[in-house]
């Protein structure tokens, strides 16, 4: 592949080991080219005077200038898609989430040693995050609220939701002995801020909501807590067997699949392990298929900004089962990938800009 077609990446991290490991991981993908390294933002700024990368991976905590300060300066002066590279510490998690509000488009966790499967999954997550960042429109984001790993070249198979639960029988319909509606949402790149806009617009008695947002392990709880502090509804990281009730949104925990289930008139979630599905865990396709099976026409599906096609097949299954589905429109998406694929597969009934989705969901639920 020619360099002109490769995604050019600048790595900014104070750890030489992390810089080397990230380089090895990223350059194992032929679509990505690392054009340089910087131990801190000052060196990065000098590098930007001679060559502009397509994507910057940025450490959260560095000497001389922290990643957040550099990110805010960058977004003000010369917006470039940024992927935050964070440790799993509490402080690092909070800072990385704040970075999403300030303009970063993705979060990845710093690579570390592990099993072969762990290393391969880490490679997939990191490379996909950089590719998603390269495809983003950084000016199309919602306005923020005030205030030594070896390269792995083998591409893992792209599994479907079949590995988690069987397809819905087209001749069947989900149990319908209830009038309670459930809102089922999937999002990826750009989704953290899109979800904020959506959830902030909902009243305290909104129907129960289950969300898959592609996000690393340990970040979803802090993300849910942050939303819980600003929304009228309650927002929490989903735990196994949590009930889906009015006035509450459950966000799938990072690195766990989350499914909608039903017992009688009670909806609840099942949180479980499993392989990557559509290259993700949690997977939107897994959640949507479970909604088709156990919710059917009682569900309203929403697919938001994101790279790739996770959710496209599951959304069609939801529609076939009787659900009504909404996709975020291209003009308001940071990346019009997942909504575009869902539309292409035929699973979408309504297309709306981000700021109109909440009202449309409530209208459908009342209807």
Image: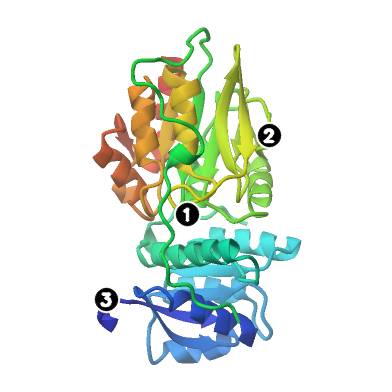
Residue at mark 1 to residue at mark 3: CA–CA distance: 31 Å
Element assignment for label 2: loop
First of labels 2, 3 by sequence position? 3
Which numbered disc covers residue 350? Answer: none
**Where the C terminus falls, by quadrant?**
top left
> Vertically, is 327 above or below 174?
below
The answer to whether the residues at label 2 and label 3 have Cβ atoms under 8 Å apart is no
Circle on res. 240: 2
Residue drawn at point x = 26 percent, y = 81 percent: 4
Residue at which label 1 appears = 143
The dot on residue 5 is: 3
Dot 1: what SS?
Answer: loop
How far across and down, in percent of the image, does residue 161 sit?
Answer: 45, 39
Q: Nearer the viewer, mark 1 or mark 3?
A: 3
Mark 2, Cα crowd under 10 Å, few <14 / some 14-19 / many 20+, is: few
* Callouts 1 and 2 close, C-beta under 8 Å: no
Quadrant containing the N terminus is: bottom left
> How busy is the neighbourhood of tag 3: few (under 14 within 10 Å), some, or many (20 plus)?
few
Place of residue 337 in the rendered image (x, y in percent of width and height, measured from the top left): 33, 51
Of the pair 176 and 277, the residue shown nearer to us: 277
Q: Is residue 119 visible?
A: yes
Mark found first going from the N terminus, 1 or 3: 3
Q: Nearer the viewer, mark 1 or mark 2?
A: 2
- Residue 291: horizontal and vertical position, in percent? 48, 27
Mark 1 residue crowding within 10 angstroms, few (<14) / some (14–19) / many (20+):
few
Q: Is residue 102 visible?
A: no
Residue 157 placement: quadrant: bottom left
Quadrant in which residue 42 is drawn: bottom right
Under circle 3, the secondary element is helix
Q: Residue furthest top?
A: 177
Q: Using residue 115 as the reference point, say whether residue 30 is left or right of it.
A: left
Residue 283: where, in percent of width, then height? 49, 44
């Amino acid at each position: 592949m020619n360099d002109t077609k490769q995604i050019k990446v600048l790595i900014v991290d104070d750890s030489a080991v992390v810089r080397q490991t990230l380089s090895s991981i990223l350059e194992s993908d032929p679509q990505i080219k690392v054009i340089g390294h910087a131990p801190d933002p000052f060196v990065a700024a000098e590098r930007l005077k001679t060559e502009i990368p397509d994507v910057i991976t940025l450490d959260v905590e560095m000497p001389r200038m922290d990643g957040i300060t550099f990110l805010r300066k960058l977004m003000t002066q010369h917006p470039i898609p940024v992927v935050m590279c964070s440790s799993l510490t509490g402080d690092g998690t909070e800072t990385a989430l704040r970075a999403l509000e300030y303009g970063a488009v993705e979060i990845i966790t710093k690579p570390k040693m592990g099993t072969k499967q762990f290393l391969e999954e880490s490679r997939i997550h990191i490379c996909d995050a950089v590719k998603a960042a390269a495809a983003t429109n950084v000016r199309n984001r919602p306005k923020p609220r005030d205030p030594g790993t070896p390269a792995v070249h083998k591409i893992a198979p792209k599994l479907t939701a079949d590995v988690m639960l069987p397809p819905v029988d087209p001749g069947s319909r989900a149990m319908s002995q209830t009038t309670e509606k459930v809102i089922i949402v999937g999002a990826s790149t750009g989704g953290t801020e899109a979800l904020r806009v959506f959830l902030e617009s909902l009243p305290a008695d909104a129907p129960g909501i289950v969300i898959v947002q592609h996000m690393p392990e340990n970040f979803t709880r802090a993300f849910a807590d942050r939303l819980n502090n600003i929304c009228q509804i309650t927002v929490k990281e989903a735990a196994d067997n949590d009930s889906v009730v009015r006035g509450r949104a459950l966000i799938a925990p990072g690195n766990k699949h989350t499914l909608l289930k039903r017992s009688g008139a009670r909806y609840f979630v099942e949180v479980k392990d499993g392989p990557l599905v559509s290259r993700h865990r949690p997977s939107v396709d897994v959640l949507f298929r479970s909604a088709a099976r156990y919710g059917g026409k009682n569900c309203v599906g929403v697919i938001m900004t994101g790279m790739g096609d996770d959710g496209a097949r599951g959304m069609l299954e939801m529609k076939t089962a009787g659900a009504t589905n909404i996709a975020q429109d291209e003009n308001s998406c940071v990346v019009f990938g997942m909504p575009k694929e869902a539309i292409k597969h035929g699973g979408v009934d309504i297309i709306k800009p981000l700021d109109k989705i909440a009202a449309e969901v409530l209208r459908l639920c009342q209807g």
